[in-house]
């Protein structure tokens, strides 16, 4: 079992930056691939970024590539999402998720943190 708690959301002007954090419980954090998703009002949840267990691989949605950076610190059981050059269309609830070894789906989800970008 992994419990995930996001933080770092808030209100920011377009062009600004935020760093989201996701703290995980348990001693097996390093065995999970991690990802960030987001859901805007009236839209389906969408993939934002993912990172492998040992940080040797990352992947991003085209809409955030070059602006967002995902990273993790396995010693602190935390995954981060650095968001730069924010746009109003980045406004959403951001969720972190964990995927176990050999799993296809993300098994565990946080409660989400709101990011609002004003124009």
Image: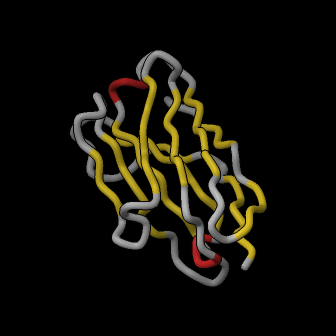
> In the current view of this chain or complex, which residue is farthest to the right?
11
- Colour pattern: secondary structure
Residue 103, quarter of the rendered image: top left
Q: Give the quarter of the figure containing the C terminus.
A: bottom right
Residue 17, quarter of the rendered image: bottom right
**Above-or-below relation of 36 to 32:** below
Q: Residue at x 34, y 43 (%)?
A: 51
> In the current view of this chain or complex, which residue is farthest to the bottom?
42
- Residue 67: % across, % down: 45, 60
- Residue 32: % across, % down: 36, 33
**Above-or-below relation of 36 to 90:** above
Q: Is residue 72 left or right of residue 21?
A: left
Q: Is residue 114 left or right of residue 95?
A: right
Between 83 and 103, the one nearer to me in the picture: 83
- Residue 8: % across, % down: 69, 45
Q: Residue at x 59, y 66 (%)?
A: 86
Q: Residue at x 57, y 81 (%)?
A: 43
């Amino acid at each position: 079992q992994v419990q995930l708690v996001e933080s770092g959301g808030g209100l920011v002007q377009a062009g600004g930056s935020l760093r989201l954090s996701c703290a995980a419980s348990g001693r097996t954090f390093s065995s999970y691939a991690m990802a960030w998703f987001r859901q805007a009002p009236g839209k389906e949840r969408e993939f934002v970024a993912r990172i492998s267990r040992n940080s040797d691989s990352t992947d991003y949605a085209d809409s955030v590539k070059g602006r967002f950076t995902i990273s993790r610190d396995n010693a602190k059981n935390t995954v981060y999402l650095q968001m730069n050059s924010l746009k109003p269309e980045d406004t959403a609830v951001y969720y972190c998720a964990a995927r176990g070894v050999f799993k296809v789906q993300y098994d565990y989800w946080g409660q989400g943190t709101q990011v609002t970008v004003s124009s």
